[in-house]
Image (cartoon, rainbow, N blue to C red):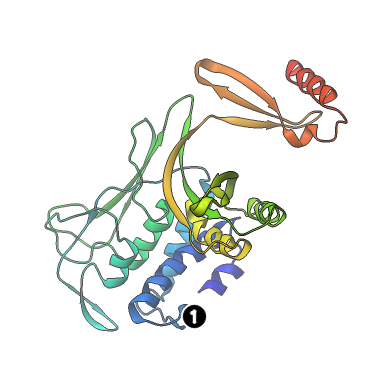
Amino acid sequence: MRSRIADAPLSAGTAAHAAAILRRIAEAEAGIHGVALDDVHFHEIGGWDSLMDVTAAGSIAAALPGVSWSVSALPLGSGLVKTAHGLLPVPVPAAAAILAGYDWRDDGVPGERVTPTGAAILAHLTGGAPGVRRGGRLLATGCGAGSRALPGMPNILRASLFAAGEDAQTDAVCVVECDIDDMTGEEIAQAADRLRALPAVRDLVLTPGIGKKGRPLVTLRLLADPAGVEAVAREVFLETSTLGLRWHRAERRILPREEIRGGLRAKRALRPGGVRTVKAESDALSGIATLAARRAAKAKGEEER
């Protein structure tokens, strides 16, 4: 399934998101069956409809970079569903494992209400946590109807798009941290440069401190895209000597900004009240010989903007 997605003529980013959704299902199945990831066999989700579902969801995720996703409480359902392993209670084990930590509600409607494929799509979009539902200006809504008739209610999934505010946008990141007390300064600097280059890493900061037994240490703290936090964690373990990581999901507000190219590269931001500010990029100033010349160039560039 991964190969079919990778070989398909899809828009940029779609294949990566679709493969990540499939991986969530595979990881859940591997854990349930106690087998290696590559030994997982998809039974119910191996058909073309499931392949189209994850590919379509991957396309939507790729087309909406920078947005944050949240999901309301999920319908629990009831009863048994027929699978390759016989009758299983709903939600089936894979769906329950993927959506552990999410809120569920019993609306009294029986049957399978959330499938493993649907669970994996929701978990991928929301980064493994239900997200914070925020108000704002409603920009658009979309509805999709299923073919199964549900007693007493329409079988409809609705998505709503909100703007967080005129002056700022809301998105979600994962904050990943670890403490390092047994690497040299040169090694830490090299590791930080490599981690900053990862596509899922948005920012990285090193903070000196004092650890146990009075030993100096460095706290490595980075912001990562929720969908890429597993890959980032793996690289942190490869690039540093740390034996453990901690991370949590955080909501943040960011101002609209644009990059200015041509002449002195700078970043222009729109602040509350319509005020625009411009700041020259640090890398654009690095080639200027002296501090005085850099400050003069920066001031001239901001004045010209």
Location of residue 267 with respect to 28 vertically, above or below: above
- Kind of element beneath mark 1: helix
Mark 1: few/some/many CA within 10 Å (<14, 14-19, 20+): few
Q: Is residue 187 left or right of residue 105?
A: right
Residue 60 seen: no
Please tell me which residue lies in front, 19 or 47.
19
Q: Residue at x 45, y 81 (%)?
A: 36
On the image, the x and y values in percent for residue 90 come to 21, 69
**For the point 17% across and 59% down, which residue is it?**
150
Residue 279 in percent (x, y) is at 68, 26
Q: How many marks?
A: 1
Work out whether residue 54 or residue 233 is closer to the camera in this orientation and state it.
Answer: 233
63 to 5, vertically: above or below = above
Q: Residue at x 54, y 21 (%)?
A: 271
Residue placed farthest to the front in the image? Answer: 213
Residue plotted at (46% across, 77% down): 37
If the image is split into quadrants, where does the C terminus sit? Answer: top right
Q: Position of residue 107 (x, y in %)?
A: 14, 54
Q: Amino acid at mark 1?
A: Asp
Left or right of residue 285: residue 207 = left
Of all residues, the one furthest to the right in this rendering is 289
Tell me: residue 234, above or below residue 199. below
Q: Image height check: is 215 above or below 7?
A: above
Taking depth in this image into account, of 55 and 255 the one nearest to the observer is 255
Q: Which residue is mark 1?
A: 38
Instruction: Look at the image and tell me whether residue 80 can be seen.
Output: yes
The reply, left or right, for residue 280 in relation to residue 60 is right
Q: Position of residue 39 (x, y in %)?
A: 46, 83
